[in-house]
Amino acid sequence: MEPNDLTGTKVMVIDDSNTIRRTAEVFLLQGGCSVILAEDGFDALSKIIDHQPDIIFIDIMMPRLDGYQTCALLRKNPQYSGTPVVMLSSKDGLFDRARGRMVGSDWYLTKPFTKDALLKAVATHAKNHSDGKK
């Protein structure tokens, strides 16, 4: 799947950093995605219900409800258990990757990410998800 085939893909970005949210939004909009932004896990939960994203990017380190807790909550809900989740972290550590896998994440992206890496993650994981829905 080419990155320009992402038109209409709904992508949620959950990060407490305004800079990361805005950067991701610009990259995703350039790729043709529709974008939903959230500041933390609590903010995201209601928006997920309203918007039904095709793929969710979650920052690991956030106040209130961190990325691991948010991902675990999504995995416990049958409606969202199959939605691809990509963990975002400024650390490229083995522990973070393993813990992300334990709570059910599909992939791991290190910040700062490139436009290509972000769109490739969407293309790979959202396509697999949408193929399963049809």
Image (spheres, helix red, strand yellow):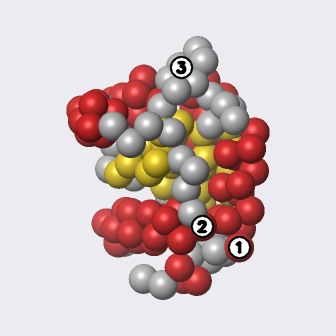
The one nearer the camera, 111 or 4, is: 111
Q: Quadrant of residue 5?
A: bottom right
Mark number, residue 65: 3
**Residue, x 67% and y 65% (percent of image)?**
27
Give yes or no for contact between labels 1 and 2 (Cβ–Cβ under 8 Å).
yes
Mark 1 and mark 3 lie on one chain; the one further toward the N terminus is 1
Question: What is the x, y in percent for residue 80?
Answer: 41, 43
Tally of numbered tags: 3
* Residue 18, placed above or below residue 69: below
**Residue, x 57% and y 63% (percent of image)?**
114
Q: CA distance from mark 1 to mark 2?
A: 9 Å
Secondary structure under tag 2 reads helix
Q: Is residue 72 visible?
A: yes
Q: Report crowding for label 1: few under 14, some 14 to 19, many 20 or more residues within 10 A (C-alpha).
A: some
Q: Is residue 80 visible?
A: no
Give yes or no for contact between labels 3 and 2 (Cβ–Cβ under 8 Å).
no
**Residue, x 57% and y 50% (percent of image)?**
112
- Quadrant where the N terminus is found in the figure: bottom left
Question: What is the x, y in percent for residue 83?
Answer: 40, 50
Q: Which residue is mark 1?
A: 30
The one nearer the camera, 99 or 37, is: 99
Mark number, residue 115: 2
Question: What is the x, y in percent for residue 111?
Answer: 54, 47
Residue type, numbered disc 1: Gln
Q: Is residue 103 left or right of residue 123?
A: left
**Residue, x 67% and y 31% (percent of image)?**
16
Residue type, numbered disc 3: Leu
Give yes or no for contact between labels 1 and 3 (Cβ–Cβ under 8 Å).
no
Q: CA distance from mark 1 to mark 3?
A: 29 Å
